[in-house]
């Protein structure tokens, strides 16, 4: 039978652990939380992990059940704390946690400012702060900036340069740049940690490029330029999809512009691009900008330097399959080109050629005037993909003036990373090339570049 705790005083978490099957009042800093989602029944659920002075090293899980998704707590910062009234201490499989019941439990979230006048920035319906608890709120407010913070264990932590599609779950520390609703109630996060994701092999059929071109980005439409221009131009911006259970995610997530640690996420390969996935069991913790893990990310990025070599793809190294005529022009990443289309002139880049259109070498093996040669290349570096045109004399310089089908097929297969002589249906890994690109408004033309034998 459930026991009742008649003492309305807030108890420390360590004391609450011994009160299984009792209702207690708690106060603690929110260190981690899951994303609001639909429960297996009719409720909405979120799980918080909280700490206090008595329970610093471990964290108490609190399961929150509400009838409306907007009634679930939405922490804003790593400094925020929560008061929980009448939560039931429960034990299951040897693990002790607290359960918030929508009928008799209540909560309130405070930050450094709201605790000054005891006015929470979010509270559940029916919450009323008890007079004796004002002193608890005042003391927690004084401790917001000083209370020890843990970023979590390193066991499952990966950076973007280390992600693998065969790893079932991992943690990622990153900065959330933007959140976008891509379809009804399905959201995409754009996150960055300063690293380049590993280049992927492709299994797409080259002959499909005309009818089913390789997508340039995971989202259906490229983001508006005013948003894209705020993204870093070095390092991969990973697209992360939410689970369908995460209703109104973008409306409830307060992490845009913050460094966070996503826990228990996973990833998959989407047409040769990395795509992150948040599952129903994924969680997040906000990180202070002076946290060791965040400082390490920033330090590693700064070590790349903002000079030319630091902007090179970290997975590339010479010799490259192509050389250029204009070594003295500025270096640019694909993100540079996407975010500065108004800048004209010629730049040099280090990219991979993922696809060409038209894909059949025989279409270019009839001697005609050089102005008849025109090909679209899909270029990729760790920051983005884009289409560039190779035509006329620049096409002849790139491939040479030999019009043998066999010679051109060999060159195109090498450029596209096709093993052997088969041009389709094979897993391929395009090599890195150095090329020059002339930027004209929003059009990109390859120029002053030629393939070499390596």
Image: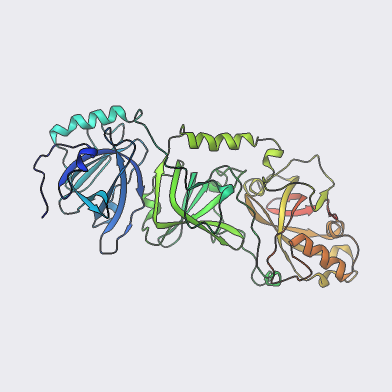
Q: Quadrant of the C terminus?
A: bottom right
Q: Residue furthest front?
A: 94
Q: Quadrant of the N terminus?
A: bottom left
Q: Is residue 396 above or below residue 7?
A: below
Q: Residue furthest left?
A: 6
Q: Is residue 348 left or right of residue 306?
A: right
Q: Is residue 274 above or below residue 118?
A: below
Q: Position of residue 359 (x, y in %)?
A: 75, 69
Q: Position of residue 283 (x, y in %)?
A: 39, 50
Q: Position of residue 104 (x, y in %)?
A: 15, 51
Q: Name the image quarter holding residue 408.
A: bottom right
Q: Is residue 440 above or below residue 42?
A: above
Q: Position of residue 48 (x, y in %)?
A: 31, 47
The answer to whether any part of residue 225 appears in the image is no
Which residue is more in the foreground, 250 or 431? 431
Q: Name the image quarter holding residue 217.
A: bottom right
Residue depicted at 73% across the width and 60% down the height = 377
Which residue is more in the foreground, 273 or 443? 273
Q: Is residue 171 left or right of residue 108?
A: right
């Amino acid at each position: 039978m459930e026991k009742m705790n008649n003492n309305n005083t807030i108890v420390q978490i360590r004391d609450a652990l011994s009160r299984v099957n009792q209702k207690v009042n708690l106060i603690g800093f929110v260190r981690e939380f899951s994303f609001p989602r639909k429960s297996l029944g009719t409720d909405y659920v979120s799980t918080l992990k909280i700490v206090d002075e008595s329970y610093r090293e471990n964290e108490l899980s609190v399961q929150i059940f509400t009838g409306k998704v907007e009634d679930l707590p939405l922490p804003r910062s790593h400094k925020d704390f929560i008061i929980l009234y009448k939560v039931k201490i429960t034990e299951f499989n040897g693990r002790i946690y607290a359960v918030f019941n929508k009928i008799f439990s209540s909560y309130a979230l405070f930050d450094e400012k709201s605790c000054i006048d005891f006015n929470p920035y979010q509270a559940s319906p029916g919450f009323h702060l008890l007079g004796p608890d004002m002193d608890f709120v005042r003391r927690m407010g004084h401790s917001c900036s000083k209370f020890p913070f843990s970023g979590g264990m390193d066991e499952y932590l990966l950076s973007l340069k280390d992600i693998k599609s065969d790893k079932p779950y991992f943690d990622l520390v990153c900065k959330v740049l933007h959140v976008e609703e891509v379809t009804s109630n399905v959201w995409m996060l754009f996150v960055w940690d300063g690293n380049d994701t590993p280049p992927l092999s492709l299994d797409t059929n080259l002959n499909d490029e005309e009818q089913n071109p390789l997508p340039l980005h995971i989202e259906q439409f490229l983001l508006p330029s005013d948003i894209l221009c705020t993204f870093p131009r070095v390092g991969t911006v990973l697209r992360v999809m939410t689970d369908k259970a995460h209703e109104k995610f973008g409306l409830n997530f307060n992490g845009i512009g913050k460094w966070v640690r996503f826990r228990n996420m996973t990833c998959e390969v989407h047409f040769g691009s990395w795509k992150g996935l948040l599952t129903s069991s994924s969680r997040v913790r906000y990180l202070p900008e002076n946290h060791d893990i965040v400082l390490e990310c920033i330090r590693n990025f700064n070590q790349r330097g903002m000079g030319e070599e630091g902007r090179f793809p970290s997975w590339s190294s010479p010799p490259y399959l192509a050389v250029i005529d204009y070594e003295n022009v500025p270096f640019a990443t694909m993100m540079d080109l996407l975010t500065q289309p108004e800048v004209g002139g010629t730049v040099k880049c280090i990219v991979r050629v993922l696809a060409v259109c038209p894909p059949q070498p025989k279409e270019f093996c009839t001697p005609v005037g050089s102005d008849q040669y025109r090909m679209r290349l899909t270029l990729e570096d760790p920051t983005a993909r884009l289409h560039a045109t190779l035509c006329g004399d620049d096409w002849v310089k790139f491939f040479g003036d030999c019009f043998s089908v066999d010679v051109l097929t060999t060159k195109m297969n090498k450029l596209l990373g096709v093993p052997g002589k088969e041009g389709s249906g094979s897993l391929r890994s395009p090599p890195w090339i150095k090329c020059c690109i002339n930027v004209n408004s929003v059009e990109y033309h390859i120029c002053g570049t030629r393939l070499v034998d390596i």
